[in-house]
Image (tube, rainbow, N blue to C red):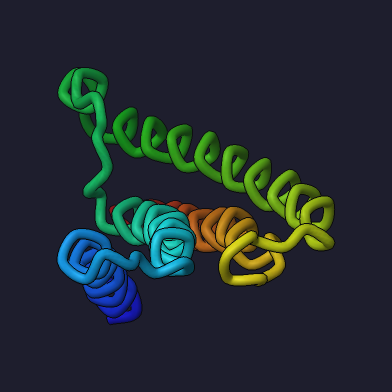
Amino acid sequence: MFMALLLFLMTILIFWQVFARFVMGSPLSFSEELARFMMVWLAFLGSAYAFRYGSLISMDLLVELFKGVWLKWLYVLIYMISIGFAFILVVYGIDMMIRVEPQVAPSTRLSMMWPYLAVPVGGLLIFMNALSLMIDTFKKN
């Protein structure tokens, strides 16, 4: 629901920016920047959501080759690699967020911490989803 709201607001802002620029002749100063920040959040939240439901682009060659218990261990390996990647996103995302916190965006005057916060939040959600999927894999017989 939150991602749908972000997409809706982003669409409204971009539409209004185009309308204000080409029809009114006076573009808004903040809408493009705010829409860009929303896009960053949407990308990281959407990737965590898509990971949870298996909607990300994948290579199914190995999945088709393995059967039974080997397929289960392949999924565990995939989830372990994903947990490692998510851990990197969280650690370095927090580091980046702290480094850019004093900077402010030119139009909105928001701290650059807010768009960069999407990186560790998305990484944390991917981490939790990978852990949950791994537990589900072990629960299956």
Q: Is residue 63 above or below residue 124?
A: above
Residue 48 in view of the camera: no
State left or right for residue 141 relative to residue 36: left
Q: Residue at x 29, y 54 (%)?
A: 50
Identify which residue is drawn at 34% across, 38% down.
72
Pick whichever, 120 or 82, lies toward us.
120
Give the side of residue 67 with respect to residue 103, left or right. left
Residue 15 is situated, as x and y percent measured from the top left of the image, at 20, 67
Spot occupied by residue 38 in the image (x, y as percentages of width and height): 42, 65
As rendered, which of 90 and 131 lies closer to the eye? 90
In percent of width and height, residue 138 lies at: 41, 53
Question: What residue sits 16% from the left and 24% below the top?
Answer: 64
| Depicted 31 relative to depicted 65: above or below | below
Residue placed at 25% from the left, 31% from the top? 58
Which sits in the foreground, 116 or 104? 104
Q: Residue 126 location in percent, x, y?
A: 49, 55
Quadrant (top left, top right, bottom left, bottom right) of the N terminus: bottom left
Question: Horizontally, is 58 left or right of 105 in the view?
Answer: left
For residue 67, what is the image quadrant? top left
